[in-house]
Amino acid sequence: MQKRRFNLHTILEKRVLTDSTFVLRLEHNGLEFTAGQHIQVGPPNGIHTREYSIYSAPTDDFIEILVREIEDGVVTPALKKLEAGDSVVVNDAVGYFTIDKEVAEGKQFLFVASGTGISPFHSFVKAFPSLNYTLVHGIRFAEEAYERHHYEPSRYVACTSRDEKGDFHGRVTDWLTQNPLNNDTLCYLCGNCDMIHDVYDILEKQGVSSKNIFTEVYF
Ligand SMILES: Cc1cc2nc3c(=O)[nH]c(=O)nc-3n(C[C@H](O)[C@H](O)[C@H](O)COP(=O)(O)OP(=O)(O)OC[C@H]3O[C@@H](n4cnc5c(N)ncnc54)[C@H](O)[C@@H]3O)c2cc1C
């Protein structure tokens, strides 16, 4: 297979989810990936790109990313200004935050996300429809439960820290402390590094082996 470098992908659709968060649906352009991998994306006329987990599934005929604007950031304010018909630059998908189908057979999964860290889990759930998972999503307000209707209601837990409109009022760490795991569970953690450190500690104390804990740190 020929190696891709940065390619231009046209934006097919932009879905605005909150004042700061949106999904960009891009042309597929033959981009191969495994659920859980990420790409670098940037505005077409700039020199800067940033990593984004792929939100869509490998079988979709488009590529999607879920982006939260960081007001004083370099790339996200520029991405937010783009609309359908504009383009972005995209490179090859990389990363090891993936599910090995052979190992996963019959296993129980715990997915813990903060904010847009839900993105690779969205791809997993679309890619593996029979997955036995619980997705615990740490957000500030219930409106940040991005596209929660895409998950089975009994498998998705919105942990809201600043309002009481989620499924659980408190942080993901509080939920985990109150809901101890079967220590055979395969645990995937994605988002900011403080959340990942705190959750890792709790899981280890609950007897989950570090070989069953997989992490993707965003910032
Ligand atoms: C493997 C990987 C996958 C990623 N996937 C996604 C994704 O799917 N969606 C997504 O929105 N971001 C994702 N990120 C973060 C993304 O790469 C950028 O860091 C983010 O979009 C900010 O870029 P920026 O240029 O606007 O801000 P910068 O100018 O790069 O940074 C400004 C500041 O914001 C901080 N920051 C970065 N991200 C956040 C955040 N989400 N919340 C609060 N502060 C933040 C940075 O640490 C920095 O201090 C991922 C990062 C990695 C490493």
Image: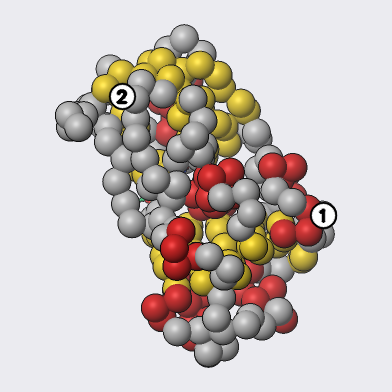
In which image quadrant can residue 47 be found? top left
> The disc labelled 1 sits on which kind of residue?
Lys
Q: Residue at x 45, y 84 (%)?
A: 209
Residue located farthest toward the right when viewing the structure as drawn: 165
User: Which residue matches tag 1?
Assistant: 165
Quadrant (top left/top right/bottom left/bottom right) for the N terminus: top left
Q: Is residue 181 left or right of residue 61?
A: right
> The disc labelled 2 sits on which kind of residue?
Val
Q: Residue at x 41, y 81 (%)?
A: 210
- Residue 172 drawn above or below residue 14: below
Identify the secondary structure beneath mark 2.
strand
User: Which residue matches tag 2?
Assistant: 89
Q: Position of residue 56 (x, y in %)?
A: 51, 37
Q: Position of residue 18 (x, y in %)?
A: 65, 35
Of 34 and 147, nearer the camera is: 34
Q: Residue at x 69, y 73 (%)?
A: 175
